[in-house]
């Protein structure tokens, strides 16, 4: 390859039409191409047998269909799998798959690092930050499917990779355009065809983008609340200084598509002696009255140098009980993949760790 070949994966439908037309082909060819790329998961133009041979050759001369490079893959004792994904500029992010019995969620990153600096989150301590492109976001999903051999898109619903959570590295609503483009590709019925009901986007509370996300994408929303008072949330989730709790909850009340059958998930990280008192739980119940809400209590996942400890099991159970009594579902999340640093909030790309630890960039074990 002398010239840089353009990657077709990650292009919107309209962009794919434009490429095909620029090659002198009829627009409908792009539909066939779309089917090969997103339904079949094919990366080799030569195997795209519904396309005429000259077109396949021309495509191969000018384009590629490729995934980001996987520089390391680890599978936890509990079967959680983590990929360290390296992009063209050598920056890295992590993708995690959390299997259940007959289904599972792939946890996708939206940025390299994160510009926000939540004090309990390891990603927030990473210096290097950039937005991921739509191709890099869709690519994470596609490489997870490669890894579980789930092409073509199973039509019987019996797929291992059944859900997406935008809960990896980064704040998805601060990279909205690329995230929206990627999710639109993923939800497209003639391709990967994952329903919006199987996609959950987690935000730290980028209030001005929430309405648009609900209207345009209609995905499930998860909100990282973590505190009931602004003074504390200002510290834990510093974006709170810009968008305080009352504004955040107003945006939740207005979130399109949220109802009792499709509740907003409020994530709440359990920090010993910080946000886990009975009074905190009671205030949560009061604050969320009238919002179609459910909780996800996340035991704090420690990382080296973290300034917090996880609440005790009895404390977490008592906290959950108060929320239950207040009428809310509040499961305590079972941490997955802790042994490979794949659990919530532990993600941080190895390239940055490596700089300090003077080891090969991808040897985490
Ligand atoms: N930036 C988005 C999505 C990524 S974080 C957000 O903040 O919502 C996904 C979830 O993991 C968030 O609820 C986040 O608060 C939580 N989290 C971050 N660090 C954690 C840690 N060390 N232990 C447990 N949960 C953590
Ligand atoms: Fe960024 Fe979310 Fe981590 Fe906060 S919790 S630093 S918003 S990734």
Image: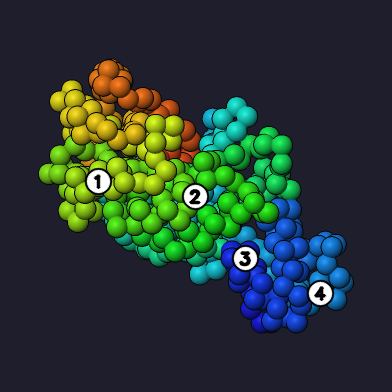
Find the residue positioned furthest to the left.
231
Q: Secondary structure at mark 1?
A: helix
Of circles 4 and 3, the one toward us is: 3
Q: Quadrant of residue 231?
A: top left
175 vs 288, left or right, is: right
Viewer-closest of 364 and 102: 102
Tell whether circle 4 marks a residue whose Cβ is less than 8 angstroms from ligand 1. Answer: no
Callouts 1 and 3 close, C-beta under 8 Å? no
Q: Nearer the viewer, residue 353 or 261?
A: 261
Which residue is at a point 36% across and 60% down the rendered structure image? 174
Closer mark to the observer between disc 2 and disc 3: 3
* 119 up-or-down from 67: above or below: above
Where is residue 12? Give x, y as percent.
59, 65
Q: CA distance from mark 1 to mark 3?
A: 35 Å
Query: Going from the N terminus, do you reach mark 4 or mark 3 first?
Result: 3
- Mark earlier in primary sequence (4, 2): 4
| Residue carrying label 4 | 55
Q: Is residue 103 left or right of residue 44?
A: left
Residue at which label 3 appears: 13
Residue that badge 1 annotates: 250
Q: Nearer the viewer, residue 102 or 218?
A: 218
Q: Which x, y percent locates residue 200?
A: 46, 43
The earlier-in-sequence mark between 2 and 3 is: 3
User: Can you give x and y, in whole percent of width and height, for residue 243 in the image?
Assistant: 21, 53
């Amino acid at each position: 390859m002398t010239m840089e070949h353009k990657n077709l994966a990650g292009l919107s439908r309209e962009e794919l039409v434009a490429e095909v037309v620029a090659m002198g082909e009829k627009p409908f060819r792009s539909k066939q191409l779309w089917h090969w790329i997103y339904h079949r998961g094919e990366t080799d133009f030569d195997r795209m047998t519904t396309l005429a041979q000259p077109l396949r050759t021309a495509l191969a001369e000018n384009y590629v269909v490729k995934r980001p490079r996987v520089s390391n893959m680890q599978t936890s004792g509990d079967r959680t799998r983590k990929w360290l994904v390296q992009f063209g500029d050598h920056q890295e992010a992590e993708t995690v798959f959390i299997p259940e019995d007959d289904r599972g969620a792939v946890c996708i990153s939206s940025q390299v690092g994160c510009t926000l600096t939540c004090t309990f989150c390891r990603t927030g301590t990473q210096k290097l930050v950039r937005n991921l492109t739509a191709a890099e976001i869709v690519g994470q999903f596609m490489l997870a499917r490669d890894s579980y051999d789930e092409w073509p898109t199973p039509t019987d619903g019996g797929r291992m990779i059944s859900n997406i959570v935008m809960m990896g590295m980064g704040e998805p609503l601060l990279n909205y355009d690329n995230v929206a483009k990627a999710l639109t590709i993923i939800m497209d019925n003639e391709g990967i065809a994952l329903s919006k009901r199987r996609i959950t986007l987690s935000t730290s509370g980028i209030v001005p983008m929430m309405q648009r996300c609900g209207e345009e994408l209609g995905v499930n929303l998860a909100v990282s609340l973590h505190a009931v008072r602004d003074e504390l949330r200002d510290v834990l989730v510093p974006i709170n200084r810009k968008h305080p709790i009352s504004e955040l909850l107003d945006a939740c009340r207005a979130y399109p598509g949220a109802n009792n059958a499709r509740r907003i998930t409020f994530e709440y990280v359990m920090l010993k002696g910080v946000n886990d008192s009975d009074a905190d739980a009671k205030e949560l119940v009061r604050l969320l009255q009238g919002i179609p809400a459910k909780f996800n209590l996340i035991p704090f996942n420690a990382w080296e140098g973290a300034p917090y400890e996880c609440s005790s099991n009895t404390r977490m159970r008592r906290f959950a009980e108060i929320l239950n009594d207040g009428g809310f579902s509040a499961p305590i999340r079972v941490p997955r993949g802790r042994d490979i640093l794949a659990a919530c909030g532990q993600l941080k790309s190895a390239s940055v760790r490596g700089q300090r630890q003077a080891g090969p960039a991808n040897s985490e074990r």
